[in-house]
Amino acid sequence: MSKYLVVFAQAHQEFRVPELESVAQLYNFKISLSDEPEERDPSRPFMIIELESENHVRLLAKRCILIKSIYEFYGRGSTYEVLHLRNRAKRHMWERYIPETSFKFIVAAYNHKIPQHRQKEVVESFAYMGFMGKIDMKTPEITLGCFEEYATRNGQTRERHEGDGDFLQVYFGRLIEEGTARPLVQLFDVKKRSYFGNTSMEAEISLLMANQTLACSGKLIYDPFMGTGSMAYPVAYFGAQVMGSDIDGRQMRGKQTTPGVFRAASQYGVASRIIDICTFDTHLTDGVRAGAKRLGRKKELDADRLALYHEHRTNPRPDDSPYIPPTRPYELSDLAVDLVLLARYLLKPGGRLVFFLPTVTDQYEEVDIYTMLCDGMEVIANSLQDFGSWGRRLVTIRKVTSELYPPPDFSIRDSEAQDETQRVPAHRHFREKYFQGFKKAEEVEAENLSHLP
């Protein structure tokens, strides 16, 4: 296997490694990452990976949303002296370009600019490579990249230093492929979409979710909380067939004759891959802001109101308006458990469940994710999008059994009735905590308990 240098976009650090591993699985090739925590630290802007061929490099660059570019790796060092020593040792990798190949050098750093005079000094320090071809800054046959990595403090770049050379590491290599998936973030920009809502998922996150699903031609993906279709468009764009449902059909339909989801899908040329959209209750809904719901009433109807309810159900309305069934709140930790049970029933072996789980930052522990698991399902990725006092975690769960399971029994459980010694997951009662400004966990739990009969 050969080593390559990945240059990442400045976004969603915790999503980088899961995306690399998912795309490698999608295209069925092996990717090797270092076992050293420092080497695979997702907060660092550069990562060295090992692949069997340059074709695999191009597949990653074509599909990974968070990749800016990938280079054939020649060397790195804590100083340029160390880098040059290691680069000279790799002469067999670059000497074939010496005679007539047109080339250009780029000298860059993560999240800051290197002055022109230092860029020139760096380029001249590679004179020993002896390239005799034409310098071509527009259409070179090869591009050689030199990248300086500077220290950060609490995740932030240290005080402005104007590329003074006081870096942690400097990397060097030959460009193999620019990341061609990044422009999809602009293509699927929600603001440019013909149909969207207040809680529509932003484009970059939708694309990252799509990669976690391993969406491609020949796959069928079901979205049980379709909403305005933010997840449907990227997975369909990647070739998958999509089936969607929602407890509130108005979110999918919109107000025009043609349902909004199909209008937006037509904008992206993927309407033929949206098999159908349905309105029904799977006991699963989307969003913290929208609020989790399930069919049912908060209070039982008395006899007179129950009779009126049945009359409305059996007799069409004069204006032919659709019947909107009543709903009641659905506690988030219960929803998560039911979601995993539904996935185990619907997925084929090796299939994936991908969803966002909101959590309170100072209450979250790793074990929280495992409170929702059932037999035959395992967590393979858990990436945080941090919003400060709270965050949402992109959770990927894989079905690891070929055993057939009956349809899940979504019996109404009392989420409060649990062993006092059992840990309360950080996503329990999240909606209440969100709108109460994240009070201390014990305060929120006390308030919830006080409302129990």
Image: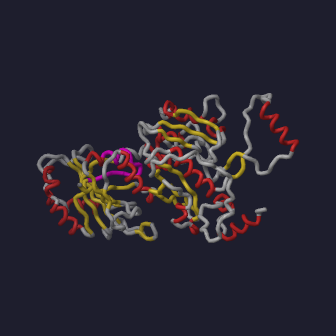
Query: What x and y, as percent, mark residue 46?
Result: 34, 60
160 relative to 394, above or below? below
Of the pair 105 and 270, the residue shown nearer to us: 270
Q: Which residue is drawn at 73% across and 39% down?
A: 324
Side (left or right) of 373 relative to 451: left
Give the magenta-colored segment's residue range.
58-71
Side (left or right) of 198 relative to 70: right
Q: Quadrant of the N terminus?
A: bottom left
Q: Does the magenta stretch include residue 244?
A: no
Side (left or right) of 238 relative to 123: right
Q: Does the magenta stretch include residue 65?
A: yes
Query: Which image quadrant for residue 87?
Result: bottom left
366 relative to 266, above or below? below
| Outermost residue, left side | 99
Q: Quadrant of the C terminus?
A: bottom right
Query: What x and y, as percent, mark residue 284?
Result: 62, 48
440 relative to 330, above or below? below
Q: Which residue is drawn at 44% across and 52% down?
A: 400
Q: How are the residues colored?
A: secondary structure
Of the pair 141 and 165, the residue shown nearer to us: 141
Query: What x and y, as percent, mark residue 25?
Result: 37, 49
Q: Residue at x 78, y 29 (%)?
A: 316
